[in-house]
Image (cartoon, grey):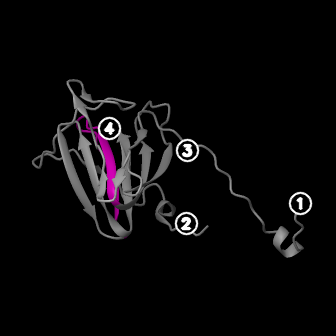
Amino acid sequence: MKIELAPEFTDILKFETYPPAPQIGGVWTHALRKNRSENGAFMEYLRLGEEGVQGLPGTLMPRQISVSWAAPGRVNAFHIHVKEEQNEVWCVIGGQLTVWLVDCRAGSPTLGVRRKLVLSGEQPTLVHIPSGVAHGYQAGNDGATLLYSMDAQFNIEDPNEGRLPWNHFGEDLWAEDRG
């Protein structure tokens, strides 16, 4: 080191590392563009064509578009779609969500891989969540508004929304990062 520290600091000093995010097969992200003006902002969420959503790294034919509002600090986890195919595209349009994805698909080359994403209305990003990938979130201090599309319709008579306990993959996932 070029800067000498006193021994009591050198002994406990650690350096951050920034490895690439772990990848889960079928999960992709796509940053959206907010077009700002003095009057506000405009953003395209999805552009649809005959084949479904256009201009994304994967395919999705939306069958339902929904909105979910999360109260500040709310943990909503873990959901998993297994009765029928149900792939989703999420986008936070207000507030912030810390999202965890875990690949639970038998035979998947990324089985067991966990991936953390921070989605916010400040920098909207789409995230594709394939069937069999457990997903959950924790809302930030101001709560969050989640806009999402799925390629299956919700059936209130027979919901395709399996649940795993919020702490199934460890309570530490939801712990505050204190640096």
Amino acid identity at mark 4: Ser
Q: Which residue is mark 3?
A: 21
Nearer to us of marks 4 and 3 is 3
Question: Quick one: label 2, few (<14), some, or many (20+) residues within 10 Å?
Answer: few
Q: Earlier in the sequence, mark 3 or mark 2?
A: 3
Horizontal and vertical percent position of residue 64: 17, 42
Q: Which residue is mark 1?
A: 2
The residue at the point 29 percent across, 55 percent down is 146
Q: Which residue is mark 4?
A: 131
Amino acid identity at mark 3: Ala
25 lies above or below 157:
above
10 lies above or below 154:
below
Quadrant the N terminus occupies: bottom right
Question: Quick one: label 1, few (<14), some, or many (20+) residues within 10 Å?
Answer: few
Asked if labels 1 and 3 touch by Cβ distance under 8 angstroms, the answer is: no
Q: Is residue 78 visible?
A: no
Q: Which residue is mark 2?
A: 177
Q: Earlier in the sequence, mark 1 or mark 4?
A: 1
Closest to the observer, 39 or 170: 39
Helix, strand or loop at label 4? It is loop
Amino acid identity at mark 2: Asp
Q: Is residue 158 left or right of residue 43?
A: left
Closest to the observer, 51 or 78: 51
The magenta stretch is 73-94
Nearer to us of marks 1 and 4 is 1
Horizontal and vertical percent position of residue 104: 41, 41
Q: CA distance from mark 4 to mark 3?
A: 20 Å
Q: CA distance from mark 1 to mark 2?
A: 29 Å
